[in-house]
Amino acid sequence: MEERVRGCPTIRRGRGHGSGKGRVPGGRRRRSRAVLAVLAAAAVLGAAGCDTAGGGSAAPESRRSSPAPVWDPSPGSIAAVGDSITRGFDACSVLSDCPEVSWATGGSPEVNSLAVRLLGKAKAAERSWNYAVTGARMADLPAQMARAAARKPELVTVMVGANDACRASVAAMTPVADFRAGFEEAMRTLRKTAPKAQVYVASVPDLKRLWSQGRTDPLGKRVWELGICPSMLADADALDAAATERRETVRRRVEDYNAVLREVCAADRLCRGDGGAVHAFRFGPAQLSRWDWFHPSVNGQARLAEIAYRAVTAERP
């Protein structure tokens, strides 16, 4: 007869000794060899993880890989960390925060923030928190993350890095190694308190593109002279070799920061980035603050919210 072991090849067993029919000389030796073959096959199948008793257990529980976590596109709460962009700085009035229009947590209908899109306006007001700080750099992120983690949010948004590149000089920019160490520490801080929180990481905007957009506006250039991102925006009209190399150095540093954000995020199973969408977005006059031609306007904040929403709700294999 045949006995099929679930999930394994069919084993054909020999006739029993008690049949008494069709005996031929040497039959006993052939039956003995058949029994030995069956036992050997069972031993091999058992070693391969098949249950010869028909139980169908593919492998010991301890050897099975744990399933990948499932991303939830509808989190029930959101905490935001980062810098002035997430605070809505210079979006509503000059030199002031305007968290109401924050792309991450703001309640403004003009922006339709990520929190409002995911939670609805009423719930967003109760279940979203903005811990970003104007002027913050990566070194400040672990402390912000600790405050955010204490809320046990289901989603944390991260947008940081522009201030690490926007320094008084290129020499003062945050080293890439320090930027990486700060982000890794921030993620460890989050995981200690909120191990199941999902994380969305926005890329650092293209600062050189902002320079190329704003340098055509006389008012914008006068505001830049007050000290906005001098490593990139100082002497906005200068096109000599030194100025060009300075801006290229900042551009490369921003690309290095974005590589760090991608790599550290990829190492966390509950983190996803924007695929470079914020860095690639072409902020035009309508998307830039009319007070500084650098920070996002209300319209720019709405575009950031759209990018984040697409990333958070996207289906992933």
Image (spheres, rainbow, N blue to C red):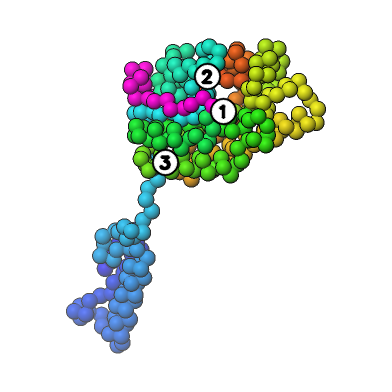
Amino acid type, label 1: Val
Which residue is labeled 1 in the image? Answer: 278
Disc 3/disc 1 C-alpha distance (Å): 25 Å
Disc 1/disc 2 C-alpha distance (Å): 17 Å
Amino acid type, label 3: Thr
Name the quadrant of the N terminus. bottom left
Circle number at residue 89: 2
Q: Which circle's residue, 3 or 1, is located before the other in the chain? A: 3
Circle number at residue 189: 3
Q: Give the residue furthest to the bottom.
A: 25
x%, y% of residue 144? 44, 33
Q: Which region shows up in magenta? A: 117-135
The structure residue drawn at horizontal position 36% and vertical position 59%, both measured from the top left corner, is 63
Q: Which circle's residue, 1 or 2, is located before the other in the chain? A: 2
The structure residue drawn at horizontal position 58% and vertical position 30%, both measured from the top left corner, is 163
Pointer 1: residues within 10 angstroms few (<14), some, or many (20+)?
some
Helix, strand or loop at label 3? It is helix
Q: Give the residue furthest to the left.
A: 18
Question: Considering depth in this image, is 292 or 61 the residue closer to the camera?
Answer: 292
Classify 304 as above or below 51. above
x%, y% of residue 256? 62, 39
